[in-house]
Image (cartoon, coloured by chain):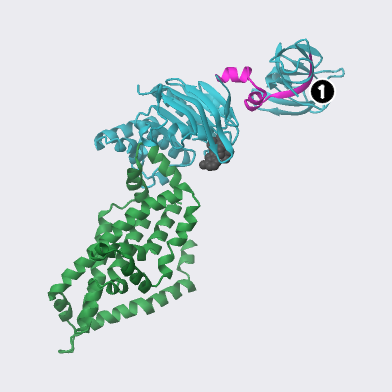
């Protein structure tokens, strides 16, 4: 296996007065798939381009298997890259596109076409190998781009929002396919996206970026359940922010006291951060603490949006079976299901 | 529906064809007709063409002009393709300036240009006929530059370049194996324009006291106007044939899908 580990150490990169990367650190293990997630302009693409050698960092080092490659030019880095925009060579056929990297490595025509067909077979496009790229759909083009990036057995695979130009169904299929291929080939992969669902679905670990720094990098599970900062909490998944009072390490929400994780202020007003699935809504004949605004049916689960007496909008996710009597306008009792909640300063 | 639209009478197209026909085809056909007249017998024949080919200097000068044109084309491609690629990729402000500069040869009179060259170039440059291709390059620059510029503007240059580089192509291979084939149409147009312009260049060549095919034709025309026309007709056809052969040898690649 040609895969190697990747380390970015104290990388800084400025464009004019924009700090695209600010003392950025990241480690990706051998065969691991790490997604970089973050809002537009936070520096994801810049990080990827620095790794690829298409951009040179102002400070810091890029290491592949502990070897400093900061001064190695892009074409010698042996990294496969898939771009957001369609980047296939329009003058070449599908198989020639896939074989391009091997051609540059002076592999004989016979061998490189054999390898190209292997890869095209893996992405399910072997039957299209003689066609030109403009004859393919968007999804097929990105498959070819993926095959092209993998054909020369890169040490690292870099994907810059490869799915963002595709429609929803294709996007889901192709991301599963990328993961399947990546696992079977064992290629160390850095995957940039601003779609958190996509990142969570296929990554070993997800790094959340904000303003050129890595806020948190963890498995999707930890990131979702134990976000390290209020920014991460808000960015990954849906999060209710409910005004509450804190004292002695306990917050009071909906009339009951819950242990506060990650204390901000020790006393006074805070925001409790609670996932929709940790809030239950129950119909009540008595005076409840909220009113139902809308209920949207999504199959197995339903999304209930309520408004509390003080005007706060609260979102709850429950199994559809238990939401039959939650009609819009009805009075309900909200309850926190978890025994601990994250709090953030107001 | 679309078909009827296309066939319908289109005044601008008709006007273009009329002007082209009047100022290009009619003179050319007339010249050809004139060149195959045989005044002695009153009929038509290839006498003047045979005379021209029998002239010792015919092949000497046409070959010389063609290789000078070939060198000009080579210089043009070697200088312009990397430069323009760089200008397009770097998005630097220099580009506007160079765009403007590339038009200068259109506004500077050739005479001024020739005299200037004669005054300023060192002896050893003026002693070699190779000064001509460099000067022709400058004369053809406005056309060659624009033609390549259009080609590079019509493709996603940055992404394609970066895809090639990350797949392992160094700059040279990126240009030769990717960029040039992708803008093949523009490159062909550049070659044709530069070649034709170099082959027909007269003023500058005469002012610098060099003999090439056009100056030789003018010289011959003084004695045998019909022969000179025959030569000119051939000089029109030979490069055309050569360019056609070149085009045939470069593999045709489907490019229609590009938007
Ligand atoms: N070549 C450049 N010149 C000037 N500024 C740049 C350049 N490339 C990036 N930037 C700036 O650096 C910052 C980070 O850009 P980057 O492309 O890395 O963001 P991103 O996280 O990939 O965003 P997106 O999700 O929109 O693709 C942005 O503010 C951007 O404007
Ligand atoms: Mg980006």
Quick one: A224 or B227, which is closer to the camera? B227
Point out the residue furthest to the right here. Answer: A287
* Quadrant of the displayed image that contains ligand 1: top right
Give the class, few, some or many, for how many residues have Cα within 10 Å of label 1's Cα (few <14, many ≥20).
many
Magenta-span inclusion, residue A224: yes
Residue A60: x %, y % from top left: 48, 28
Residue A171 seen by the camera: no
* Relative depth, front residue between A13 and B248: A13
Q: Which residues are magenta?
A: A219-246
Give the quarter of the figure containing the N terminus of chain A. Answer: top left
Does residue B198 appear in this view?
yes
Rendered shade, chain A: cyan
Please tell me whether residue A262 belongs to the stretch shown in magenta.
Answer: no
- In the image, what residue occupies the spot 57% across and 31% down? A212
Up-down relation of residue B203 to residue A132 (above or below):
below
Question: Image height check: is A135 above or below A184?
Answer: below
Return the residue at label 1.
Answer: A290
Between A268 and A336, the one nearer to me in the picture? A268
The colour applied to the residues of chain B in this rendering is green
Q: Can you give x and y, in whole percent of width and height, for residue B41 in the image?
A: 15, 89
Q: Is residue A36 left or right of residue A120?
A: right
| Residue found at x 35% / y 50% | B180
Instruction: Say which residue appears at 76% left-offset and 20% top-offset.
Output: A270
């Amino acid at each position: 296996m040609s895969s190697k580990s990747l380390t970015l150490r104290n990388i800084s990169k400025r464009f004019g007065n924009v700090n695209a990367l600010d003392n950025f650190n990241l480690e990706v293990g051998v065969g691991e798939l790490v997604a970089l997630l973050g809002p537009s302009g936070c520096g994801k693409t810049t990080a990827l381009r620095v790794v690829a050698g298409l951009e040179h960092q102002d400070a810091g080092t890029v290491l592949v298997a502990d070897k400093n490659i900061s001064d190695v030019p892009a074409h010698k880095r042996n990294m496969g890259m898939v771009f957001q925009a369609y980047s296939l060579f329009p003058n070449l056929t599908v198989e020639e596109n896939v074989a391009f990297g091997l051609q540059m490595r002076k592999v004989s025509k016979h061998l490189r076409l054999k390898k190209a067909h292997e890869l095209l077979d893996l992405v399910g496009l072997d039957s299209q190998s003689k066609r030109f790229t403009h004859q393919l759909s968007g999804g097929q083009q990105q498959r070819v781009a993926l095959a092209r990036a993998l054909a020369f057995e890169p040490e690292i695979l870099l994907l810059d929002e490869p799915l963002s130009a595709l429609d929803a169904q294709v996007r889901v299929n192709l991301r599963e396919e990328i993961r399947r291929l990546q696992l079977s080939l064992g290629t160390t992969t850095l995957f940039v996206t601003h779609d958190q669902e996509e990142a969570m679905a296929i990554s070993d670990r997800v790094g959340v970026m904000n303003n050129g720094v890595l806020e948190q990098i963890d498995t999707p599970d930890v990131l979702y359940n134990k976000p390290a900062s209020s920014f991460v909490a808000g960015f990954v998944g849906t999060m209710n922010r409910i005004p509450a009072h804190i004292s002695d390490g306990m917050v009071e929400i909906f009339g009951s006291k819950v242990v506060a994780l990650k204390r901000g202020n020790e006393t006074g007003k805070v925001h409790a951060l609670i996932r929709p699935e940790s809030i239950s809504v129950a119909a009540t004949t008595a005076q409840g603490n909220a009113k139902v605004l809308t209920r949207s049916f999504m199959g197995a689960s339903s999304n209930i949006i309520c408004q509390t007496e003080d005007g706060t909008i609260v979102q709850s996710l429950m199994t559809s079976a238990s939401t039959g009597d939650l009609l819009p306008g009805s009075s309900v009792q909200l309850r926190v299901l978890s025994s601990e909640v994250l709090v953030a300063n107001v | 529906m679309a078909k009827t639209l296309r066939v319908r009478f289109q005044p601008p197209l008709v006007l273009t064809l009329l002007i082209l026909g009047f100022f290009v085809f009619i003179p050319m056909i007339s010249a050809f007709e004139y060149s195959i007249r045989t005044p002695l017998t009153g009929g038509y024949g290839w006498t003047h063409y045979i005379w021209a080919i029998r002239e010792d200097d015919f092949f000497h000068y046409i070959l010389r002009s063609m290789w000078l044109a070939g060198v000009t084309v080579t210089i043009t491609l070697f200088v312009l393709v990397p430069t323009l690629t760089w200008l397009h990729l770097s998005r630097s402000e220099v580009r506007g300036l160079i765009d403007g500069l590339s038009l200068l040869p259109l506004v500077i009179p050739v005479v001024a240009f020739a005299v200037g060259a004669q005054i300023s170039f060192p002896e050893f440059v003026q002693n070699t006929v190779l000064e001509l291709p460099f000067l022709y390059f400058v004369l053809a620059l406005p056309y060659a530059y624009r033609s390549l510029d259009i080609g590079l503007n019509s493709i996603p240059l940055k992404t394609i370049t970066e895809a090639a580089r990350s797949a392992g192509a160094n700059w040279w291979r990126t240009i030769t194996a990717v960029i040039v084939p992708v803008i093949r149409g523009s490159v062909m147009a550049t070659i044709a324009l530069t070649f034709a312009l170099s082959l027909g260049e007269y003023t500058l060549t005469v002012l610098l006291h060099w003999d090439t095919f056009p100056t030789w034709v003018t010289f011959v025309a003084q004695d045998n106007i019909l022969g000179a026309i025959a030569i000119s007709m051939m000089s029109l056809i030979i490069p055309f044939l050569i360019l056609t052969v070149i085009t045939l040898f470069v593999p045709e690649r489907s490019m229609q899908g590009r938007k």
